Image (cartoon, coloured by chain):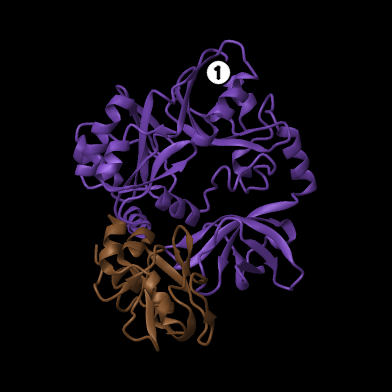
Chain colours: A purple, B brown
């Protein structure tokens, strides 16, 4: 089990630690709801040291990455980034990640903790000419600062540091890398630094008022915004088109990419399922991953929830599921089976909040 | 950690008030509510249900997880705390008062001797 460079700080803050993606990570400090509200209303700080970072450099970097990833890296100016996906030959998702262009021929990729090895092995199994690949995951620690006061906290810490990168922008300050992104739907940034320095930075943000938040709040925040979680909502069976991520798939870019043909035929022939947002109608138990989704007419099970929780913002159970396309239209009524009862639910437009 | 002296406790962190065996209140301990955090939903049994000691007879849900509640003693459920439907957070804020869940008419009060008193429950937690 891996330990974050911030592990001792989590213990000192009274965090509850759980295993996640091969790491011991904090699931909560004070409580999930309080941490969730801190991010929606003020500013929270999440340890994301478990996430992976790759650096790709060289004259062949653009073409190599563009042949592996669904979005079009040629659209990026230096300092810009984009959400993108790495697919298998059938169009199933190996990982979703963010790719930044950090130089003329240099890219910085941030990948999911549980998929670092799969990403690296897949990428290196499809080698390119004129490319160096460097897995920096073990060298870098990271945290995300998220919430309407995220930028204000940064300026309190580093008044002379200049402008925080805008959404999907990256900037480097010495050894520190700042990315204008997050996983909560709020303003903020991800902050990367060498493992031996990340703790000192964390302390400064916490001292400036950022509330430590765990994976529990991270999950409710991202689910309210319908951001998919790889391993739950994304898998190697469903394509990004089915996941509702078609915007990040550029079928027409020169040279194509691995998995492209499956996606093209889905675009022409239609998709069998669509990742849909489902909300309970009334007060009922929170939704959970794996609960069965039933047709409202009593004809039986149509799907299982790939994610589920209570939305602190709505006070109702919310979840995601790959519904048959014909049942995925917002307004469609469904039932969710929870233990020995069923509860009315409906498909709603994304996001929930 | 608040462990009132007059209650009895299970290893699974339920408490029961043995002073009124015809309608003994049952809930979860301060330690349990702190472990659960953010109680958001309770599924309670119907009045009239017969429960056996150790049987899972209710479900308590936090944002993160659903947990079974086990009957500290056998008997009939004679009252259910309906106020928890609207205010499940009472389990967090007042686990031994407003956070009571059901009252059980004990069918075999001798079973209570298998539970922990406050002193041994405190020891169990330490």
User: Can you see residue A112?
Assistant: no
Q: In this view, does A129 lie above or below A342?
A: above
Q: Mark 1 points at which residue?
A: A61
Give residue B18's quadrant in the image: bottom left
* Outermost top residue: A130
Q: Where is residue A151 in the image (x, y as percent from the top left)?
A: 29, 43
User: Can you see residue B35?
Assistant: yes
Q: Where is residue A19 in the image (x, y as percent from the top left)?
A: 45, 42
Q: How many C-alpha atoms fall within 10 Å of the one at disc 1: few (<14), some, or many (≥20)?
A: many
Give residue A294's quadrant in the image: bottom right
Q: Is residue A329 above or below residue A98?
A: below
Q: What element does badge 1 sit on?
A: helix
To which chain does the residue with label 1 belong? A
Give residue A255's quadrant in the image: top right
Instruction: Give the camera-side residue of A115 and B67.
Output: B67
Q: Where is residue B79 in the image (x, y as percent from the top left)?
A: 44, 86
Q: Report the residue at 29% width, 30% height from top.
A: A198
Q: Position of residue A174 (x, y in %)?
A: 29, 22
Q: Report the residue at 71% width, 32% height from top.
A: A259
A296 relative to A107 in the view: left or right: right
């Amino acid at each position: 089990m891996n330990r974050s460079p911030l592990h001792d700080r989590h213990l000192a803050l009274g965090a509850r630690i759980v295993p996640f993606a091969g790491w011991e990570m904090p699931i909560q400090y004070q409580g999930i709801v309080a941490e969730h509200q801190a991010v929606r209303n003020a500013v929270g700080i999440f340890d994301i040291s478990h996430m992976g970072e790759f650096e790709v450099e060289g004259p062949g970097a653009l073409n190599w990455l563009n042949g592996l990833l669904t979005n079009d890296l040629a659209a990026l100016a230096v300092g810009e980034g984009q959400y993108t996906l790495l697919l298998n030959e059938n169009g199933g998702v190996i990982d979703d990640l963010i790719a930044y262009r950090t130089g003329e021929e240099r890219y910085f990729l941030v990948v999911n903790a549980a998929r670092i090895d799969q990403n690296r092995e897949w990428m290196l199994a499809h080698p390119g000419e004129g490319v160096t690949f460097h897995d920096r995951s073990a060298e870098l620690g990271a945290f995300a600062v998220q919430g309407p006061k995220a930028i204000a906290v940064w300026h309190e810490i580093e008044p002379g540091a200049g402008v925080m990168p805008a959404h999907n922008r990256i900037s480097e300050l010495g050894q520190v890398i700042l990315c204008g992104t997050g996983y909560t739907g709020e303003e903020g940034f991800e902050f990367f630094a060498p493992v031996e320095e990340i703790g000192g930075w964390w302390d400064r943000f916490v001292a400036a008022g950022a509330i430590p938040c765990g994976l529990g709040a991270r999950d409710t925040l991202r689910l309210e915004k319908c951001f998919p979680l790889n391993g739950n909502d994304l898998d190697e069976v469903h394509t990004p088109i089915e996941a509702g991520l078609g915007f990040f798939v550029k079928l027409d870019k020169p040279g194509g990419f691995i998995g492209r043909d499956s996606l093209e035929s889905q675009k022409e022939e239609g998709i069998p399922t669509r990742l849909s947002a489902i909300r309970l109608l009334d007060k009922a138990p929170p939704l959970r991953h794996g609960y069965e989704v039933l047709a409202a007419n009593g004809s039986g099970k149509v799907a299982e929830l790939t994610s589920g929780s209570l939305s602190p913002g709505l006070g109702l159970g919310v979840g995601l599921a790959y519904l048959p396309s014909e049942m995925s239209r917002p307004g469609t009524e469904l039932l969710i089976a929870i233990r020995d009862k069923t509860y009315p639910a409906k498909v709603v437009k994304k996001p929930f909040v | 950690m608040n462990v009132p002296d007059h209650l009895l406790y299970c290893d699974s962190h339920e408490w029961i008030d043995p002073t009124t065996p015809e309608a003994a209140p049952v809930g979860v301990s301060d330690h349990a509510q702190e472990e659960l955090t953010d109680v958001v939903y309770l599924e309670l049994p119907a009045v009239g249900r017969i429960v056996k000691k150790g049987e899972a007879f209710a479900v308590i849900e936090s944002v993160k997880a659903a947990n079974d509640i086990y009957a500290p003693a056998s008997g009939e459920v004679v009252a259910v705390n309906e106020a928890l439907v609207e205010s499940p957070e009472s389990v967090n804020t007042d686990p031994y008062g407003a956070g009571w869940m059901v009252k059980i008419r004990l069918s075999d009060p001798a079973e209570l001797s298998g539970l922990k008193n406050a002193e041994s429950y405190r020891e169990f937690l330490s």
